[in-house]
Image (cartoon, rainbow, N blue to C red):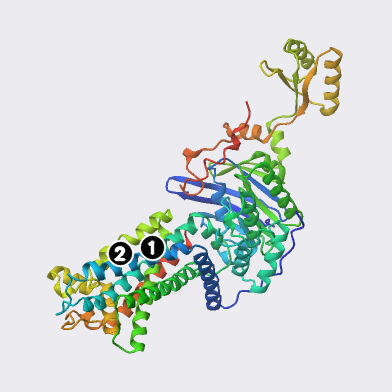
Amino acid sequence: MSAVTEAAPLAAPGNPVGRSVRDSLIVAKRNLIRMCRIPEMVIFGLIQPIMFVVLFTYVFGGSIQVGGSSSTQAYREFLMAGIFAQTVTFATAGAGAGIADDMHKGLIDRFRSLPMARGAVLTGRTLADLVQTALTLLVLAVVALLVGWRTHENLGKVLAGFGLLLLLGYAFSWIGALIGLSVRTPEAATSGGLIWLFPLTFISNAFVDANKMPPFLRHIAEWNPFSATVQACRELFGNFPPGYRTPDAWPMQHSVWVSLIWSILITVAFRTLAVRKYRSATA
Amino acid sequence: MPGAIYAEGLVKTFGDVRALDGVDLDVPEGTVLGLLGPNGAGKTTAVRCLTTLLRPDSGRAVVAGVDVLKDPDAVRRSIGLSGQFAAVDEYLTGRENLQMVGQLYQMRAKAARQRAVELLEQFHLTDAADRPAKTYSGGMRRRLDLAAALVVSPPVMFMDEPTTGLDPRNRQQLWGVIKQLVSGGTTLLLTTQYLEEADHLAHDIAVVDHGRVIAKGTSDQLKARTGGERVEVVVHEREHIGTAAEVLRGFGKGDTTVEEHTRKLTVPVTGGAKLLAEVIRELDSRGIEMDDIGLRRPTLDDVFLSLTGHVAEAEEAAGNDRSGKAGKGSKGSKGKETVK
């Protein structure tokens, strides 16, 4: 083997924020390259929500009543915000499994031995997941349009709705990051990232009109943080069915702000916990 | 002045297991220390403490002149780590892996690109540079992992069982790279459970068992502690064993041991090659045909046995180096081929 040459000396580290952003983008790029090389992961991530769109539209659509309307079209429009919101929360499992896999393979050790910003490995991962979530939403929106979903507000509001969805997805990928650092195998991270999402997303206003639930469940659904985003999107998309009455519960009355605040709170809390966990992570 | 790697009283416990129980190390600049010990001895934990991956419960460590606990980030700028699991991203190409690591060492993108090209060349990976690392053979992955650790030519290197699981050819090749690296002045701490590897690569050896350094010294010093040289003869004919034993008794400084079924006789001696020549002449003059004869010095296996009272065998039950995570016990039991 030929002589091992010397590398150029290192530049002194720049300012910490710049370094953190730069390192995060480097790691995000790495995760995006991976995503392109494992397209089946993106594709499987799309199948489930598309299946939900089709199943709920055609199988349940005829028998679920929302607001004062029993029209299938009303339910279709009502439903999509729920499926969009549920889909973005699945970013949890992706982030969790990815980070658990990196731990398992010793890559986290490699990263932790490098003079890089501490949070960058996790931020890079969640940023890449955000890109994936955006792609998934795009495909899902096209499918939704094909089965008859329409928005009834101006473009700005519709985009704001998607913005809230992306923010929710980003917040949940930080929950996934913490799960990924806390379990021993990628498989455990996947199931650990999914199981609790089902009750969370079903005991909500995502698929049915919470007004029609028994009082006990109705209260849970109305205060469920997840419901706030669904409600906010319906409002921004103009997807309330005819005769729908916004519940009196406070988070439902101020859903856009509540959704925004929840996403920020979850991001800050779980980012703090995950970065702390990362610093002491052992494979 | 403390060496490039210095540790004093390192202690690390995982639950009830004292993985490190007061480890002291001092590796002078430009030398290689082999940390030798069975699975679960604490080698990996020691490396993890010295490379800032793990915070010791107590003790002090200085690497490349920087206190590991006080300024871990400065330590990270001066070290390279190559682990027992080839830690490269298998979906990235070799080139992408090296570029990423370079950039995360805070090199500029262009410099990192250039450095990746150099390293791929040096590690014979140019042809595979643009293939995802998952298509690489085990040996290629190790080389890529090592290249990643060398991106910034760190003055201090840590290699945790660099050749575990490699076939002999790849091991030889990697040894070549390591020797070359060290000849360039890099300080290296290398853990291994292959006694032969420590003997081959390290200037100094620290034998670790149950979280403690139980012996230190050069390979020769450690061997001298176990006893001197001996002559080993394998005779061709079984009936010659008796005569040969008689001859050896005349030259020996102790009891002659005889293994009937292998026709092997061993006797401790002093006098080296000159004495060996005399033994050969005497055996020859008595018409004894020999299959093999030689002057044997104690191996590190002998050293390990005499120091620990047990062979350098995997001690899975004692828990693993990696805080209870299973995974390497099965593949690294080469240490078993020890003394009779």
x 87%, y 14%: residue: B285
Query: Please, what is the three-letter code of the amino acid marked with disc 1?
Result: Ala
Where is residue B195 drawn, in percent x and y?
65, 39
Few, some or many C-alpha atoms within 10 Å of disc 1 (few <14, some 14-19, many ≥20)? Answer: many
Chain bearing mark 2: A
Query: Please, what is the three-letter code of the amino acid marked with disc 2?
Result: Leu
Few, some or many C-alpha atoms within 10 Å of disc 2 (few <14, some 14-19, many ≥20)? Answer: some
| Above or below A53: residue B304 | above
**Which quadrant is the C terminus of chain B positioned in?**
top right
Where is residue A106 drawn, in percent x and y?
53, 56
- Per the model, the C-alpha gap separating discs 2 and 1 is 10 Å
Query: Which corner quadrant of the image does residue B165 belong to?
Result: top right
Per the image, label 1 sits on a secondary structure element best described as: helix
Horizontal relation, residue B167 to residue A166: left or right: right
**Which quadrant is the N terminus of chain B positioned in?**
bottom right
x 68%, y 72%: residue: B111
Query: Which corner quadrant of the image does residue A269 belong to?
Result: bottom left
Q: CB of mark 2 within 8 Å of CB of mark 1? A: yes
Where is residue A235 drawn, in percent x and y?
26, 83
x 22%, y 80%: residue: A252
Residues A96 and B46: in front is: A96
Residue A225 in view: no
Residues A52 and A119: in front is: A52
Question: Which numbered circle lies on residue A197?
Answer: 2
Residues A258 and B189: in front is: A258
| Above or below A144: residue B314 | above
Per the image, label 2 sits on a secondary structure element best described as: helix
Question: Which numbered circle lies on residue A124?
Answer: none
Which residue was labeled with disc 1? A93
Please count the marks in the image.
2
Horizontal relation, residue A45 to residue B194: left or right: left
